[in-house]
Image (tube, grey):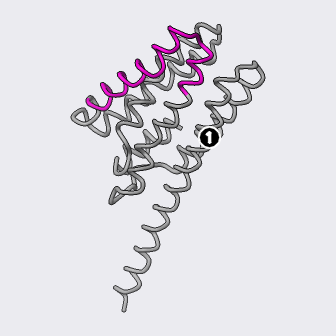
């Protein structure tokens, strides 16, 4: 998912990509690495560490001016809503709390998809692949009887599918407008 979005940002541009969404993705990695270490899950740790440079790359494509502010906000959100509850009440609550943040990470992207004049930088394939990836993690958490993380994945899959649908609709709308415009130009 992240590679596809990074590549689109490099090739097409960053129009419509939410810096807050991508900052939250990067900041949430702190929890996922710690949780993976706690569970002894090399795949969780490796998956998070390997994707972090690409997430940072998307933010760098957006630009440091906007991204650093979003990243500081994201760190504060992760600290207050995930790390503190985890430290006070345990990992299962932390995994459930991250579900709330995983949904919240997608809200800025949904808003941008609705209000931004152009969303050509947002990749449909990235969000669709992310939904598949989250489905695999859902299976992993169900298989390991981790209810907090499993619920997080279900809610996040739903919001990812909303983003996928909105992005697809906005891209198709642009294509339809261009077809009409080109048709009128030929007349």
Query: Residue 145 appears in which quarter of the rendering?
Result: top right
Determine whether the residue tagged by mark 1 lies in a helix, strand or loop: helix
Decide if residue 72 is on the left or right side of residue 109: left
Query: Residue 74 appears in which quarter of the rendering?
Result: top left
Between 61 and 19, the one nearer to me in the picture: 19
Inspect the magenta stretch and tell me whether residue 83 lies in it.
yes
Inspect the magenta stretch and tell me whether residue 100 lies in it.
no
The residue located at (37%, 79%) in the rendering is 181
> Residue 67, image x and y in percent?
29, 33
Residue under label 1: 157
Decide if residue 10 is on the left or right side of residue 171: left
> Residue 23, image x and y in percent?
38, 31
Decide if residue 138 is on the left or right side of residue 30: right
The residue located at (32%, 28%) in the rendering is 73
Residue interval drawn in magenta: 69-98
Seen as rendered, the residue at the extreme front is 89
> Residue 98, image x and y in percent?
53, 25
């Amino acid at each position: 998912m992240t590679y596809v979005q990074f590549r689109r940002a490099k090739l097409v541009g960053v129009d419509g990509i939410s810096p807050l969404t991508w900052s939250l993705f990067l900041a949430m990695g702190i929890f996922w690495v710690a949780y993976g270490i706690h569970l002894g899950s090399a795949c969780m740790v490796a998956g998070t560490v390997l994707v972090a440079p690409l997430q940072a790359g998307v933010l760098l494509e957006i630009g440091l001016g906007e991204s650093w502010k979003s990243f500081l906000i994201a760190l504060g959100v992760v600290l207050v809503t995930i790390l503190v509850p985890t430290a006070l009440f345990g990992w299962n609550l932390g995994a459930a709390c991250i579900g709330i943040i995983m949904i919240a990470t997608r809200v800025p992207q949904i808003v941008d998809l609705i209000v931004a004049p152009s969303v050509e930088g947002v990749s449909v394939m990235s969000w669709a692949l992310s939904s598949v990836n989250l489905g695999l993690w859902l299976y992993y958490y169900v298989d390991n009887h981790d209810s907090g993380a499993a619920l997080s994945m279900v809610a996040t899959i739903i919001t990812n599918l909303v983003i996928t649908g909105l992005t697809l609709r906005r891209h198709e709308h642009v294509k339809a407008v261009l077809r009409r415009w080109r048709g009128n130009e030929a007349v």
